[in-house]
Image: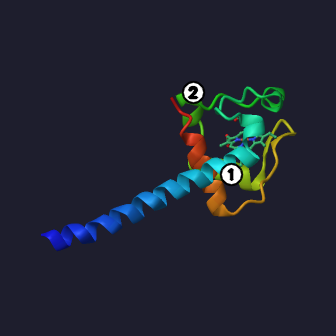
Amino acid sequence: MKKLALLAIPAALALAFTTNAMAADGKAVYTDNCAKCHGDDGKGATKMGQKLGARDYTDAKVQASFTDEQALKSLREGLKKDGKTMMRAFELSADDLKASVAYLRTFKK
Ligand code: HEC
């Protein structure tokens, strides 16, 4: 019994560490690449965000309006509306893009 507990601790620590590291990555990618339009709080209330019409990502309805797949496609290929570029395509790794979308999801209230 004692032996089992000793084995379980490192496994739990490793898991906690991995999860934390991933969340930190998403935040860093977001802060570097996304916050100037979408805002540190996801509300899009920055100068650039307002000019381009970034939506409020704390709104559950806005979050529900696209799937993760759509979001990743928009980030890979860029997003246009009425011929106007809303977001350019990002040259980030698939993992970084996924992490930034996962971080964007955390703004939902
Ligand atoms: C140049 C400003 C700008 C930057 C930088 C930017 N976005 Fe956007 N983004 C927009 C605008 C404008 C829209 C369209 C309006 C909206 O949906 O908020 C948009 C839309 C989106 C959407 C919705 C996509 C869809 O298909 O409906 C997601 C998700 C998103 N952005 C995530 C991000 C992430 C993650 C980053 C960083 C990797 C990022 N954006 C960087 C301006 C920007």
Sequence order check: which comes first, mark 2 or mark 1? 1
* 86 sits left or right of 63 in the view: right
- Give coordinates of residue 100: x percent, y percent: 63, 50
Real-space CA distance between mark 2 and mark 1, rounded to the nearest whole angstrom: 22 Å
> Which residue is found at the position 46% from the left and 60% from the top?
17
Quarter of the figure with residue 57: top right
- Give coordinates of residue 24: x percent, y percent: 58, 52
> Which residue is found at the position 84% from the left and 27% from the top?
51
Q: Are there few (<14), some (14-19), or many (20+) residues within 10 Å of tag 1?
A: some
Disc 1 residue type (three-letter): Val
Select label 2 or label 1 by which is in front. Answer: 1
Q: Can residue 70 be seen in this view?
A: no
Q: Are there few (<14), some (14-19), or many (20+) residues within 10 Å of tag 2?
A: some
- 56 is higher (above) or lower (below) than 36: above
User: Disc 1 beta carbon < 8 A from ligand 1?
Assistant: yes
Residue sticking out furthest to the left: 1
Q: Mark 1 points at which residue?
A: 29
Q: Is residue 19 visible?
A: yes
* 18 sits left or right of 49 in the view: left
Disc 2 residue type (three-letter): Asp
**Quarter of image, ligand 1:** top right
> Which residue is found at the position 84% from the left and 35% from the top?
82
Kindly indicate whether the residue at mark 1 contacts the one at mark 2 (C-beta within 8 angstroms). Answer: no
Label 2, secondary structure: give it: loop
Q: Name the residue under label 2.
A: 59
- Give coordinates of residue 84: x percent, y percent: 87, 38
Quarter of the figure with residue 41: top right
Quarter of the figure with residue 94: bottom right
